[in-house]
């Protein structure tokens, strides 16, 4: 089995590939000329570049490739027309980062409910100032995008006594979900947002979800609403969100993803007092990349045994 790995050969997480069987002939590189020479004999490709530029270059040359795996969960940067139209299956790291992102959602909700910024500010000022805080129990979490991350966040919210609603493209798949108090379709998103105290955006980026949470949707939110984005930045209309935060139309936002990353210096998000900002590191737990490679190794075993692959991407749907 000839495996072509698109990655910096010095990346420490590639050491996990030593778990592959001896029958695996592994070629690793990030130089376009080098990997292009190896592409014609590749049976499978591991895209560990976090984007799709090099994959797009080598794919037309990989005439024997039978399977491609994307090391990240998001595949919007790895999809292009030739790959979408081809019969070659694409898998990803869906679910690997769900637990850590679910914890970030819960931490963000508690950050606002307990007004932790005010506590820290008073402590730093040496000021004793009693104030009331909120309980999450009884509050409503509305989840936009009920995949692995959305479900994990919903379970944590439910465990704390929150009521949980979800919006998903196929609501019938969650009709018997014991965690959920209600399921909405995409055309009912404003109705769900109007009921939600904490809006968790966990949708992948596709043509259908780009700008899904826009000015109209933000206008439907409660004044005390907190937006928590752990999906992809462009799913939310950033300009509309900034305006709502600057005018205190909504209570706040906790953001792990953005339209442009790294976030440019001087961006309003840096200075807004009602924003909790994570530099796209909410899932950067110890060994997070290694866990993604472990997922690939497990799928490799499925592939060589002729077993169904895990996390097969619907290339036309984009996730």
Image (cartoon, rainbow, N blue to C red):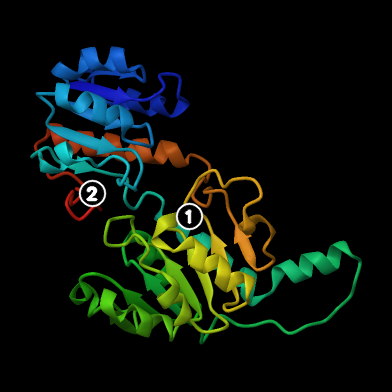
Residue 293, by quadrant, is: top left
Mark closest to the chain's N terminus, 1 or 2: 1
Query: Up-down: is 152 above or below 31?
Result: below
Query: Up-down: is 158 above or below 71?
Result: below
Image disc number at residue 25: none
Q: Which residue is labeled 2 in the image?
A: 311
Task: Name the residue furthest right.
Answer: 126
Task: Please name the residue shown 52% across and 67% down the image.
Answer: 241
221 displayed left or right of 46: right
Task: Please name the residue shown 76% across and 71% down the image.
Answer: 118
Q: Look at the image and tell me in which quarter the N terminus lies.
A: top left
> Do tag 1 and tag 2 residues touch (Cβ < 8 Å)?
no
Front position in the image: 75 or 96: 75
Image disc number at residue 100: 1
- Secondary structure type for disc 1: helix
Q: Residue 3: x, y in percent?
A: 22, 23
- Can residue 222 be seen at all in this image of the molecule? yes
Task: Please name the residue shown 27% across and 62% down the image.
Answer: 208
- Secondary structure type for disc 2: loop
Q: CA distance from mark 1 to mark 2?
A: 18 Å
Query: Up-down: is 230 above or below 36?
Result: below
Task: Please name the residue shown 23% across and 28% down the image.
Answer: 45
Q: Residue 170: x, y in percent?
A: 20, 71
- Can residue 185 be seen at all in this image of the molecule? no
Crowding at mark 1 (Cα within 10 Å: few <14, some 14-19, many 20+): some
Crowding at mark 2 (Cα within 10 Å: few <14, some 14-19, many 20+): some
Q: Residue 83: x, y in percent?
A: 16, 38
Front position in the image: 53 or 182: 53
Q: How many marks?
A: 2
Front position in the image: 178 or 168: 168
Q: Residue 72: x, y in percent?
A: 36, 42
173 displayed left or right of 192: left
């Amino acid at each position: 089995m000839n495996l072509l790995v698109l990655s910096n050969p010095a990346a420490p997480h590639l050491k996990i590939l030593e778990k592959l069987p001896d029958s695996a002939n592994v070629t690793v590189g990030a130089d376009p000329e080098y990997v292009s020479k190896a592409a014609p004999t590749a049976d499978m490709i591991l895209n560990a570049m976090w984007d799709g530029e090099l994959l797009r270059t080598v794919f037309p040359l990989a005439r024997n490739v039978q399977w491609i795996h994307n090391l990240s969960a998001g595949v919007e940067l790895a999809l292009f027309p030739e790959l979408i139209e081809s019969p070659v299956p694409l898998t990803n790291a869906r679910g690997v980062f769900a637990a850590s992102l679910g914890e970030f959602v819960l931490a963000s909700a508690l950050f606002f409910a307990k007004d932790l910024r005010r506590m820290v500010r008073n402590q730093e000022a040496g000021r004793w100032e009693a104030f009331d805080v909120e309980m999450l129990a009884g509050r409503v979490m509305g989840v936009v995008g009920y995949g692995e991350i959305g479900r994990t966040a919903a379970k944590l919210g439910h465990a704390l006594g929150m009521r949980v609603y979800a919006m998903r493209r196929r609501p019938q798949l969650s009709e018997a979900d014991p965690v959920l108090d209600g399921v909405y379709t995409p055309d009912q998103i404003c109705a769900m947002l109007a009921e939600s105290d904490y809006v968790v955006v966990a949708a992948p980026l596709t043509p259908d979800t780009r700008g899904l949470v826009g000015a109209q949707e933000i206008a439907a939110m409660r004044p005390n609403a907190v937006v928590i984005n752990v999906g992809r930045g462009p799913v939310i209309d950033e300009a509309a969100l900034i305006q709502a935060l600057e005018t205190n139309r909504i209570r706040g936002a906790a953001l792990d993803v953005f339209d442009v990353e790294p976030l440019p210096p001087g961006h309003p998000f840096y200075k807004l007092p009602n924003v909790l900002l994570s530099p796209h590191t909410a899932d950067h737990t110890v060994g997070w990349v290694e866990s993604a490679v472990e997922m690939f190794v497990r799928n490799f075993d499925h592939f060589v045994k002729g077993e169904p692959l895990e996390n097969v991407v619907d290339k036309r749907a984009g996730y």
